[in-house]
Image (spheres, rainbow, N blue to C red):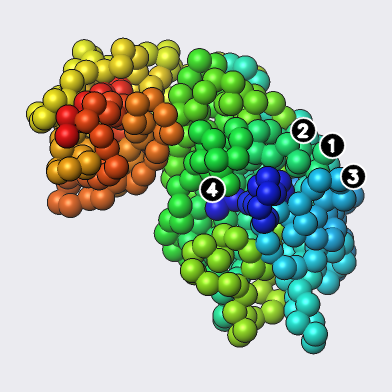
Amino acid sequence: MRKTALPRPGAGPAGRTRGRRPGRRTLPTVIGALLVLIAGALGLSVTGGSAAAAVPAPPSGWTTVFSDDFNGASGTGLNRANWLYDTGIGYNYPGAATMWGTGEIETATDSTANVYQDGSGHLVIKPIKDAAGHWTSGRIETQRTDFAAPAGGQLEISASLKQPAPAHGLGYWPAFWAMGADARPVGATNWPGIGELDIMEDVNALSQHSTTFHCGVWAGECHDPDGISSGLQACGGCQSGFHTYSVVVDRTNTAAEQLRFYLDGSVTYTVNENQVSTGTWQAAVDHGFFAIFDVAIGGSYPNKVCGCTSPSADISSGAAMTVDWIAVNRTTGGSTGTVGGTSTGTSTGTSTGTSTGTSTGASTGTSTGTSTGTSTGTTNGGATGGGTSSPDYTASAASTGSGHARITFVPTTPAAYVDVHYLVNGAGQQNFRMTNSGGTWTQNISGLSAGNVITYWFTYEKNGPQYDTPHFTYTYTG
C-alpha cells in the first residue's frame, strides 16, 4: 500500500509510491461547459469516463500552478523541463533502497518504448517484458517540488487517467502519487518522515484503487510501511475509461488540517491532522511536494493482496496506463467555496455542533461515554439530512468477553461508510472501515486488559459529505 524507497533497518525492501490515459476526444461544448460548472461547485478538477480535450480550468478562487495535457507528437518523449525520468531500479544515492524499496522487478527507462505521448493528447506508460523475461517500464516525476498548500489555504493535485487492463494482470502496480520535496536530494532515504500521498494505486488488475498517507517513522504512529490507508476500494470502469483522482491538502485551519482523497469529485478517504502527532503531521504535510506517475511490476503491495509472489507466469506484457492530464491547483488562503461538497474554511478546531461531549448512545459496561474535551476539528455530522446542529448517530462501546470489546456506531441517516479510529491507553492509533449489519456498524477489539482505556471517534458519510465525531472514551474492566 505504498511506494517509497527506504529499506527497513536490518530487513528487506520496504514500501513506496506512484500514477496514467488514451486517444483524445473533444467533448461537445455543452458537456464541456457542464463539467466546468460541476468542477467549480466542488472545488475540484473533474472528468468522468472519457478524456477531456484540455486541462479543466481551476474553480473560482483557485489558481493552476502546474499542468500538462500531453499534446506532443506521436511517439515523442516528455518535456524534460517539466518532467524528470527515473531510470534503473532505484535512486542512485548511498543508502537508497534497490528495487525502489518495494521489491518490484522492472527497470525504469526513459525509452519511448515505455514512456511516450501518443499524438492524441495522452501520456502512455507501458511495461514490457522481453524474450528473456526481463521487464522495463516507466516512472516519471515533476521537476518542480514546490507544490504546497499555503497556511490558511489549500492544494489540489489531480490527474485524469485510465488504469491498465491486461488480460492477465497479477503483478501490475500502477500509481499516481506525490512525495515530500526533501526526498529528492537524498533519494528518499528520509522516508516516510518527509510525507507521501498515494492518490491512486491499483494492483493485480483488480480495477480498484487505494489511497494512503505515509508519515513519521518505520512502525510508528502512521503504521508504516503500510501507512494510513483506505485499502483497496471499488473503482468500476477504471480500466475501461478515464477517471479523475485527486488529493486536497487542506490547511484552511492550521490547527485542524486535513487530507481528502477524491475519485471523480467524491470523497473516498480522509486523514485528519489529529490522527498523528503535530510534529509528525507538519514534517509530512506542511511543505512542497512533487508528483509521480509509474507502473511497476511485482513487489510488496501486489504480493500482499494476492498472498503470493508476483508476477504470475502468465502475466500479460504491454498493458499501459494512460494519462489525459495532470493539474496542480491552489488557493492563497481562506475559504474559497466548496471542495467535495463540504465547507472548505469553516472548521474552527472545536465541535461546531451542539454535542455536549457525552455519548449519545447507551454505552454499556464501564464506558465513560464522555468526550475527550475537544472535537476532531470538523463538524460532528449534525441533524438528519445534512445539517450540523446536533449529533446524527448513537455511539457506544462494550465488553464482549475476556479481553474483547466492541465499538458500535448507528447513524440516523444511512451512511455509505463509517471509519472508526481508536487508541488503547493513548498509543498506536488504529483506523478501520467498520462492518455494517443492517445499519449498525461495529468494530471488535481484542487483546485488552482490565483498566485499558479506549479513546475512539468516527468518520462517516452522510448524503455525500463526510463528517467526524467528537472523541469518546471507554474503560475496559475485564
Q: Earlier in the sequence, mark 3 or mark 4?
A: 3
Residue 463 sits in quarter: top left
Instruction: From the image, tell me which residue sits under label 2.
Output: 182
| Mark in the foreground, 3 or 4 | 4
Q: Along the line of sight, which residue is nearer the eye, 46 or 92?
A: 92
Instruction: From the image, tell me which residue sits under label 4.
Output: 226
Residue 120 sits in quarter: bottom right
Q: Can residue 38 be seen in this view?
A: no
Label 3 sits on a secondary structure element that is: loop
Dots 2, 4 in contact, CB < 8 A: no
Label 4 sits on a secondary structure element that is: loop
* Amino acid type for the residue under numbered disc 3: Ala
Determine whether 272 is above or below 371 in the image: below
Label 1 sits on a secondary structure element that is: helix
Dots 1, 2 in contact, CB < 8 A: yes
Q: Which of marks 1 and 3 is nearer the N terminus?
A: 3
Crowd tier of the residue under label 2, counting other residues whose Cα lies within 10 Å: few below 14, some 14–19, many 20 or above = many
Pinpoint residue 424: horizontal percent, then vertical percent: 34, 31
Q: Residue 185 carries which label?
A: 1
Which image quarter is the C terminus in? top left
Residue at 22 percent across and 41 percent down: it is 403
Pinpoint residue 138: horizontal percent, then vertical percent: 77, 62
Marks 3 and 4, Cα distance to the nearest angstrom? 33 Å
Crowd tier of the residue under label 3, counting other residues whose Cα lies within 10 Å: few below 14, some 14–19, many 20 or above = few
Q: Is residue 87 visible?
A: yes
Instruction: From the image, tell me which residue sits under label 3.
Output: 81
Determine whether 323 is above or below 357 in the image: below
Determine whether 158 is above or below 49 in the image: above
